[in-house]
Amino acid sequence: MDRRTITSIAGVGIVAAAAGLGAGSLIWRNAPASHEGEGAGEHAESQHEQGETEEAREGFVALPPATASTAGVEVTTVARGGGAELLIPGRAAFAPNAQAAVGAPLGGVVQRVHVAPGTNVRAGAPLVTIRSPEGASLNASADAARAEVEAAQAAHRRETQLYRAKVTARQDLEAARATSLKAQASLRAAQAQIAAVGSPGATGYVIVRSPMAGTITSLGAATGSVLAQGATVAQVADQNRVELIFEAPAGASRTIRIGSPILATMAGGEEIRSVVTAISPNAATAGAQVRARPIGFVPPAGTPVSGRVLTGAADTIVVPADAVQNVEGRSVVFVADGSGFRATPVVAGRSAAGRTEILKGLTGRERIAGRGAFLLKAELSKSEAEHEH
């Protein structure tokens, strides 16, 4: 029997030939023939050691788990779950605080529009500029309040001097002080009102700014248009903060658990993996609302989906469906073992929501190859085919 060695492949050109495993993938090749001068005894001993090594490494693919991700193999842990499968309708929606409707703080004429639908903006970015007569009036009121403060403070200083000279009564001094404090309070109120409406300038120009970073999803203003106070100027949303919302039967709130996986399917057949983050009663439908966080691909908000989830309190070992591979007619899971993965025979049960029950073969403490496990299967099949030759 020829000796074989495992060679680590790092070059991109060789990677393409190595069953598509990517950087760090492995191939099997024949070792150079032994020198002609070796004795028959040494050759027999070598064959014996080689037989023991190959037998020990049967079903083994040498790929360090720490670098498996670079080869396209996801390493994950075994979970527990099980129960019955439940089909529930749902949709993609923005997560709480992931969108904002920006209103006009003052009524006025739109002088300039700084954005368009689809524009990505940062927090504080200008959306539109409005010229508002009310803004100019607020500034004038603040100026008047500031003048009153100056006059009241001057009167208070005079009364203080007269009181010290024993010309006026203490009552007059206290009245002047109260008038000064009242004027200062009026000025602070006027300044706060100006700040609350976007700090318009003396001519009434005010810039409406985005309260958050995101994408402009709609725009309700055009140059020259007149906006009423409170009218929606634009809507901003963070497209990356999308969750899946499912409507489930009332009893599902007692069987679906937070952390349970849900496999959602879009109309075109695309699958979205997600994890349950919240379950709450829905008074409007007399059912339960299930919220889930997408993993990986995030669909656009408003996309209709259907979900599959395992319910119940069974304590069965479950693994990602991609982890279970068929090798020579047997179901196996590739378990991380030292410097590689070993094909471990298992007895698989039901599959739902992208997960498969394992009835026998795993203890629940293993680290296994999940998505991309088929690459290990292909490498194992190739090495066994070369071994037969």
Image: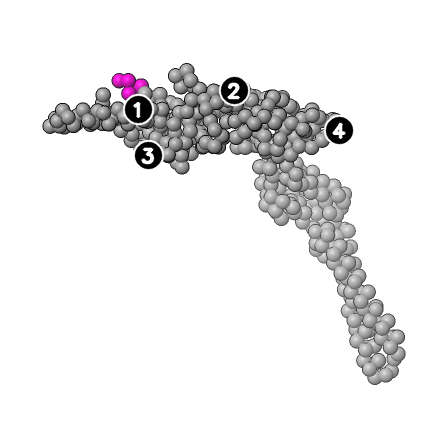
Q: Is residue 325 visible?
A: no
Q: Quadrant of residue 40?
A: top left
Tag 3's secondary structure?
A: loop
Tell me the mark number nearer the camera, choosing from 4 and 1: 1
Residue 176's disc is none
Residue 349's disc is 2
- Residue 121 coordinates in the image, percent (x, y): 59, 43
What residue did someone put label 1 on?
Answer: 55
The stretch in magenta equals: 385-389
User: Looking at numbered disc 1 in the image, what kind of residue is underneath it?
Assistant: Glu
Tell me the mark number nearer the camera, choosing from 4 and 2: 2
Q: Main secondary structure of the magenta part?
A: helix
Tag 3–tag 2 contact (CB < 8 Å): no
Question: In the figure, is residue 313 to the left or right of 228?
Answer: left
Point 52% across, 23% down: residue: 357
- Residue 388 coordinates in the image, percent (x, y): 28, 18
Q: Earlier in the sequence, mark 2 or mark 1?
A: 1
User: Looking at numbered disc 2 in the image, what kind of residue is underneath it?
Assistant: Gly
Q: Nearer the viewer, residue 56 or 139?
A: 56
What residue did someone put label 4 on?
Answer: 284
Q: Nearer the viewer, residue 387 or 111?
A: 387
In space, the residues marked 1 and 3 are separated at their CA atoms by 27 Å
